[in-house]
């Protein structure tokens, strides 16, 4: 089974000239992909390039409008995801699709549990689950509910479920991983990669979709790049350097956005917001913070260090129980978001899906809602005014959509984020809090959002930006506040604004 | 993730693409959008038309209208007139359902408001507007109780309104002291059986309520806020929308609508029957909203479509009577026809029907 990658060998799965149309959009045009047994194949492209659509065609979620799909040289078409699974194509989606309240073993064998006298044989199921997971180097209590384990373990369980033998189905030949590392830390990524290498040796062809280019170079053998729903090229990973790869993905050389000077429209400007000894229960402790006007301040720290909690506190979502807060020179006490918005504070929240967008409403409505809420329900923004706002920001932020009436839920991640940003820009806040504004979006949109942050500073807006990407923070911050265990541990500026210094501050003396 | 075929940056380097994009944007309401909106109205209207057609086949006189004593008579007018209480309930229910909630208490609220009217009229020293005003205030108060339980106490809507559904009828019985309270008041009775410009007064009341509500919801941002809260309450709060206040408001409005329905029902029989007034009508109202194409999970709503849903239900009841079938078949037939209407509206079912029709072809393409 372990054939080496060899262009003479027949690909296990081949997609040729796949077309897929949605109303108003050609999602895939002549897209192609060849997978060989025993390779990790990175499928790359910006958000909206058509990767997910191609995967959905491959896994039977969507039906292709044209082209052919060859599995072991036989032309097939999958009417349902189940058909694809039966044929040996398994998928693990970005969001773990498991049942957190059931045990690990149950999750692994859901729908194909080992039976005894017609009832589920729990003992056998636990045994098989342990065997399966131990082949992944995972030794956990398989009878405990899945929710008790870290996201990384859950991700591994999802993959194990993907390749677990199923009743009446062919052996897994192709495994598709859609952004499997998005919620994993560095160690967990390495564990995952070990498992992938094992699967590779067993002759499984793995499709690996990610935004992390470093990981592409670590694990993948070959790369297929897509852009605008079209196939751009297929490369050997070892023969393609990063700059070439980015150029292929963007269709142009990415101007190096990094390491620019911080934006300082106004030198030594007044603080628009100052907090003194601000506390809120256990989530933020004795915070001193000054946000100068016309500057972007970075907020760094690990997940759970209190970054998001600060944003919530400054937006009135949580209430302070100690310390003082002043905004534009006068003391304030924020009781709810509406209050914060009325004062001129806006928050672009961390979780776009649950806290940001209203998926079923149109782009136009999503953009105008915050302004409408600020004005009050009785002073309606006319449809014409809404349309003007939407058109203006679609143009300004280059939101890729055929029209403003498209539901925001149907846009790609980067475009959704831009709509949420547009919503707050329409309110014209004095202080904009951005909590992880670039998470899960593609390089192009990423660069554009960094550019926008700089522009807004120059226009005199103050920003507080949270990010896990330290290099990104140094690209625009005039100073960076570092959080650890709910407390501010450092405030870096000037010479200290580099990823190494931030990293050292995050790690602290204890490490 | 979806399928935006346009990568942002490439709009610079690719003028052709940018032009296409702009042209697409200028065609503001793309055919896809308006076609979708059209189909939302299409299925309920087709169902209504088919039912009317069946009626006319059963009874050739079905569409006939007579002018008598300054008002129109005929089966169609009957349907409109009889629809009035449920139509009012459905208007309120649409809003509650749009926030992802449900109000089971509206039938009982009708009974309470009816009892309030009947008892005040019996006392005799209350003016006509005062009686109406107090009845409506009673309905609003009931809505306030529901809304407070749902939005500020965090009780599940179905449970919170179940409380008033049961207790409300008890309150009405207490008000009536266990009797059916009748009254003689021609002014008030006209609200149920009178006519204005040829149409029954209840029909006018529904039209008036529909108009006022449409203005209130669509000429302000209230309707949009209700939809936003229904789609994603958390994101709405992050937007500065008072999601609890919005939820409270919809129950309040539903209570007000129920009060109007209760007034019509009481005026119609010139009495208040606490046991039977508005009995099970909340279910008809919910059904009408669903037939109108709303999702119980919340989100978009349309008052006109809910009213079309009410007309379908009422026409169906009339059809069963007209058909001359024994009345014991009524409920079963009603259920079956409604099931059919709902299945027609289900996109999943339509697709399954389509794939069933082209079964052979699909099978041939597969290995």
Image (spheres, coloured by chain):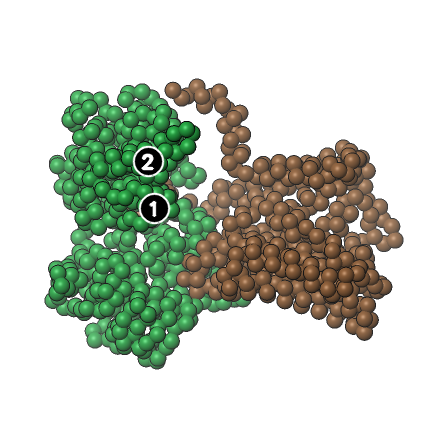
Q: Colour of chain A?
A: green
Closer to us: A185 or B298:
A185
Residue A162: x and y in percent read 30, 35
Residue A395 drawn above or below residue A318: above
Classify mark 2: helix, strand or loop.
helix
Residue identified by numbered label 2? A123
Crowdedness near tag 2: few (<14), some (14–19) or many (≥20) residues, C-alpha within 10 Å: few
Residue that label 1 marks: A145
Image-quadrant location for residue A470? bottom left
The hue in which chain B appears in the rendered picture of the protein: brown
Q: Residues within 10 Å of mark 1 (few under 14, many from 20)?
A: some
Is A45 or A149 nearer to us in this picture? A149
Q: Residue at x 27, y 71 (%)?
A: A285
Inter-mark Cα distance, 2 to 1: 16 Å
Name the quarter where the N terminus of chain A is drawn. Answer: top left
In the picture as drawn, the residue positioned furthest to the right comes out as B69
Q: Chain of mark 2?
A: A
Q: Chain of mark 1?
A: A
Residue A118 bears which disc, if any?
none
Q: Residue at x 35, y 59 (%)?
A: A349
Residue at (52, 29) in percent of width and height:
B354
């Amino acid at each position: 089974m372990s054939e080496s990658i060899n262009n003479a060998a027949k690909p296990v799965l081949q997609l040729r000239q796949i077309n897929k149309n949605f109303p108003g959009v050609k999602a895939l045009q002549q897209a192609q992909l060849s997978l060989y047994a025993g390779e990790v194949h990175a499928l790359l492209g910006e958000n909206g390039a058509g990767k997910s659509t191609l995967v959905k065609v491959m896994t039977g979620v969507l039906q292709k409008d044209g082209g052919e799909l060859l599995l072991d040289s036989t032309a097939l078409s999958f009417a349902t995801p189940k058909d694809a699974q039966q044929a040996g194509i398994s998928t693990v989606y970005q969001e773990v699709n498991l049942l957190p309240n059931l045990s690990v073993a149950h999750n692994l064998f859901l729908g194909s549990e080992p039976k005894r006298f017609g009832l589920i044989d729990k003992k056998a199921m636990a045994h098989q689950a342990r065997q399966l997971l131990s082949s992944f180097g995972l030794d956990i209590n398989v009878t405990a509910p899945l929710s008790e384990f870290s996201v990384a373990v859950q991700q591994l369980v999802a993959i194990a479920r993907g390749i677990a033998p199923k009743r009446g189905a062919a052996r897994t030949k192709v495994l598709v991983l859609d952004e499997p590392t998005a919620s994993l830390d560095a160690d967990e990524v390495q564990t995952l990669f070990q498992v992938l290498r094992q699967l590779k040796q067993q002759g499984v062809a793995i499709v690996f979709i990610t935004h992390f280019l470093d990981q592409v170079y670590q694990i993948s053998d070959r790369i297929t790049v897509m852009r605008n729903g079209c196939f751009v090229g297929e490369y050997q990973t070892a023969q393609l350097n990063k700059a070439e790869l980015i150029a292929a993905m963007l269709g142009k050389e990415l101007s190096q956005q990094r390491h620019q000077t911080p934006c300082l429209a106004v030198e030594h400007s007044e603080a628009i917001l100052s907090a003194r000894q601000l506390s809120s229960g256990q989530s933020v402790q004795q915070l001193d913070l000054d946000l100068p006007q016309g500057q972007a301040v970075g907020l760094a720290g690990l997940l759970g260090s209190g970054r998001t909690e600060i944003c919530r506190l400054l937006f009135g979502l949580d209430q302070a129980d100690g310390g003082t807060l002043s905004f534009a020179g006068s003391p304030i006490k924020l009781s709810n978001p509406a209050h914060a918005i009325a004062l001129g504070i806006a928050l672009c929240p961390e979780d776009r899906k649950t806290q940001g967008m209203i998926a079923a409403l149109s782009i136009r409505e999503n953009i105008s809602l915050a302004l409408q809420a600020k004005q009050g329900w009785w002073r309606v923004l006319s449809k014409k005014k809404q349309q003007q706002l939407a058109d203006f920001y679609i143009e300004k932020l280059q939101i890729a959509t055929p029209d403003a009436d498209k539901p925001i839920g149907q846009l790609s991640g980067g475009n959704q984020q831009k709509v949420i940003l547009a919503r707050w820009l329409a309110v014209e806040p004095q202080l904009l809090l951005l909590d992880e504004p670039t998470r899960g979006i593609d390089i192009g949109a990423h660069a554009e959002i960094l550019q926008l942050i700089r522009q807004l500073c120059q226009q005199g807006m103050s920003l507080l930006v949270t990010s896990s990407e330290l290099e990104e923070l140094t690209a625009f911050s005039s100073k960076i506040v570092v959080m650890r265990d709910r407390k501010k541990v450092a405030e870096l500026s000037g010479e200290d604004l580099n990823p190494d210094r931030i990293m050292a501050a995050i790690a602290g003396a204890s490490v | 993730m979806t399928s935006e075929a346009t990568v942002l940056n490439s709009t610079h380097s690719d003028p052709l693409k940018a032009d296409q994009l702009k042209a697409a944007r200028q065609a503001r309401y793309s055919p896809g959008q308006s076609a979708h909106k059209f189909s939302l109205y299409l299925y309920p209207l087709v169902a209504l038309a088919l039912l009317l057609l069946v009626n006319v086949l059963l009874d050739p006189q079905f569409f006939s209208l007579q002018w008598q004593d300054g008002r129109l008579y005929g089966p169609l007018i009957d349907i409109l007139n009889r629809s009035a209480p449920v139509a009012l309930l459905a208007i309120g229910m649409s809003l509650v359902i749009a926030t992802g909630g449900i109000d089971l208490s509206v039938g009982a609220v009708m009974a309470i408001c009816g009892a309030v009217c009947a008892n005040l009229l019996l006392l005799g020293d209350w003016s006509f507007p005062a009686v109406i005003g107090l009845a409506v205030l009673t309905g609003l108060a009931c809505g306030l109780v529901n809304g407070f339980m749902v939005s500020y106490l965090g009780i599940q809507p179905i449970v919170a309104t179940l409380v008033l559904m049961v207790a409300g009828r008890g309150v009405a019985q207490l008000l009536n002291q266990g009797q059916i309270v009748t009254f003689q008041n021609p002014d008030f009775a006209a609200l149920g059986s009178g006519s204005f410009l040829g149409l029954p007064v209840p029909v006018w009341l529904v039209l008036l309520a529909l108009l006022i509500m449409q203005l209130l919801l669509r000429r302000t941002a209230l309707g949009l806020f209700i939809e936003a809260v229904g789609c994603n309450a958390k994101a709405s709060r992050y937007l500065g929308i008072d999601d609890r206040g919005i939820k409270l408001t919809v129950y309040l409005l539903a209570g007000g609508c129920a009060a109007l329905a209760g007034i019509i029902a009481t005026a119609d029989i010139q009495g208040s029957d606490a046991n039977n007034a508005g009995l099970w009508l909340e279910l008809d109202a919910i059904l009408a909203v669903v037939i109108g194409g709303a999702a119980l999970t919340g989100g978009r709503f349309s008052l006109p479509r809910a009213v079309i849903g009410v007309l379908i239900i009422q026409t169906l009841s009339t059809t069963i009577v007209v058909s001359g079938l024994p009345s014991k078949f009524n409920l079963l037939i009603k259920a079956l026809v409604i099931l059919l209407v709902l299945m027609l509206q289900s996109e999943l079912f339509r697709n399954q029907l389509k794939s069933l029709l082209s079964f052979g072809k699909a099978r041939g393409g597969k290995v």
